[in-house]
Image (cartoon, rainbow, N blue to C red):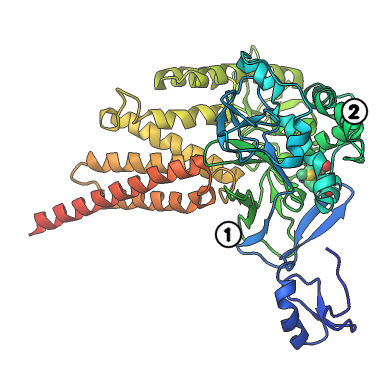
Amino acid sequence: MGSSTDCPVCGVAATLVCTRCKLVRYCDPEHQKQDWAQHKRRCKPFRVAEDEQLGRFLVATQNIAAKQIAFVEEPLVVGPKWYHSQDETIVPCVGCHTPCRLGKHQCRSCHWPVCSAACADEALECSVLSLGPTPGARADNRTLNDYFRGDALLVLRCLLLQRQNPAKWTALLEMQSHEEERQGTELHVEAEMRVVDFLQQRFLKRLKQTKPDLLADCGSELLHRICGIIETNYMVIELPSGVELSGLFRQACMMEHACQPNCYFQFDAFTQQITVRAGCDLQKGDHLRIAYTNILWGTQLRQHHLRLTKHFSCHCARCLDPTENGSYVSALACLGDVNLCCTGTHLPVDPLNEETQWKCDTCPMLVDAAYVSELQTHMTDQVESLLAGRPTAKEVELLLARLSQMLHPNHFHMFNLKHTLIQLYGNEPGLEMDTLSNGQLERKLRLCEELHDVCRRIDPHSIKLAIYVTVILIEIAHTLEEQSRRASPDTDVAGLLEQAHARLKEAEEVLEKEHDSVAGKKLNDKLQREIFECEKLNLTHKYSQKAVVE
Ligand SMILES: C[S@@+](CC[C@H](N)C(=O)[O-])C[C@H]1O[C@@H](n2cnc3c(N)ncnc32)[C@H](O)[C@@H]1O
């Protein structure tokens, strides 16, 4: 977005600046008023900036209050999810993205999956897909998935923009692709097999023979560039049906990464428009930031993921701090040495260096990166395999006890296990709320508070962790309600119930950011029932107190 010093109405040199975007100047208020109908579509509270390290990024040109919309934007392209699994049985319809069973209906012309016999994909896309072979009538799921590769279709949709929408095509090609960094990597090799070779062999070679003028360029180099653009920029769009799509957006994809983001976004289920909002109060000059990776992971894992897929190292405040804002989500327990039992904590000396040593904050013990990485891998396997199998509270407690010998209590593996545990205590058959001992109730409450504290440290405005925090707050409220039911004569029952209600209302505020997501909607239904029950409990208590007084 460039700025001009001439009034857009009369072309005279002007000094009166639009106070919102600070980009357009007017000669007088009258011309500003006259131009508003035009200008409001382009007037935004941010501008695009660029530097060596970040490439393009967005900077607030004025203060933006928490929850205020920064912008709404149409996608450049939307398609099936990047990284298509070979085992899918339900895929998005190529016409309307409704989930459809693979092999049930197919487009009459191109034979790609559609939700009903009446649905069809876009004409140009369909004509290109029609050039490819079709699977036999008895093909199994794996074979069908191999014919109808969603991720290759996403690349084809990008490629066809050069014919369908030159403005979108130009915007797409301006996006970062990291082509050079991808050369020779596993990502490049995989893209060659999964997408580039597939599209060339099945459709594009024939396209060049039959309609050589349809696309100016459909060579493999361009296809690899598009794969790089998608990998670097794609956003996951989850539809209410549970189907996941991938989308590219001209502006939204310019937002830089931070492990403590300050913006959040929601998608319109029908148009796939993105709405970006401030997650906290932004000051003029602040960069608009989102998280590209899982902020619950420790620094080494986040950095590894960002280097591998987005080709940069994050230098945000959290990444530079070995304690990660005091959360200790990467920290290990010191094992001491043969002569010494130590209660200290191991932290990376240089968190951004994959080869860094880890130093104990209490004793002189140092361990090297290879040892830490081996330990992490071993523990990841244990945690993932336990959680995949719907464990009981007892099984989670056992693994927690084992891992606590080696990990800090807030380590992200411990966080995951504890987050599962707080939901098992009170809900697992045989461990319902009224059957828990007072000790178990207190443990549940303590775990909830510990988890809440970790969330506050890594995401103070609950921008990315809204679902996690809501679950924690609901479990805190449950526990307080149960404690109020068990009260001895000198317990402040009204106080406990008030606290429970306050936690649920806090959850309601936090969950607002997730109102449009599938998980958010489901959790909100539960939360509303919890609030109703808590208010009922409160009223019942008040009436019983009144009856005693009377
Ligand atoms: C989604 S794009 C963002 C827009 C991009 N800067 C552009 O000019 O099109 C992601 C890329 O931006 C750069 N980037 C984003 N956040 C960054 C950060 N915190 N530090 C360094 N580079 C970053 C990286 O090159 C990354 O692969």
Q: Which image quarter: residue 403?
A: top right
- Nearest the viewer among 498 and 271 is 271
User: What secondary structure is marked by label 2?
Assistant: loop
Graded by Cα atoms within 10 Å as few (under 14), some (14 to 19) or many (20 or more), the crowding at tag 2 reads few
Report x, y in % for residue 350.
78, 33
| Residue extending furthest toward the left | 550
**Is residue 304 at all visible to an observer of this figure?**
no
Graded by Cα atoms within 10 Å as few (under 14), some (14 to 19) or many (20 or more), the crowding at tag 1 reads some
User: What secondary structure is marked by label 1?
Assistant: loop
Q: Which image quarter: residue 184?
A: top right
- Nearest the viewer among 117 and 535 is 117
Asked if disc 1 is less than 8 Å from ligand 1, the answer is no
**Is residue 414 at all visible to an observer of this figure?**
yes
Report x, y in % for residue 390.
45, 21
Q: Residue at x 79, y 87 (%)?
A: 28
Whole-angstrom CA distance, mark 2 to mark 1, is 41 Å
Figure quadrant of the N terminus: bottom right
Among numbered discs 2 and 1, the one appearing first in the sequence: 1
On screen, 471 above or below 333? below
- Nearest the viewer among 317 and 134 is 134
Q: Which residue is mark 1?
A: 67
On screen, 445 above or below 26? above
Count up the numbered dots. 2
Q: Which mark is residue 251?
A: none
Q: Residue at x 40, y 19 (%)?
A: 394
Q: Which image quarter: residue 211?
A: top right
Looking at the rendered image, the disc whose residue lies closer to the viewer, 2 or 1, is 2
Q: Residue at x 75, y 70 (%)?
A: 21
489 on left or right of 410: left
Q: Which residue is mark 2?
A: 183
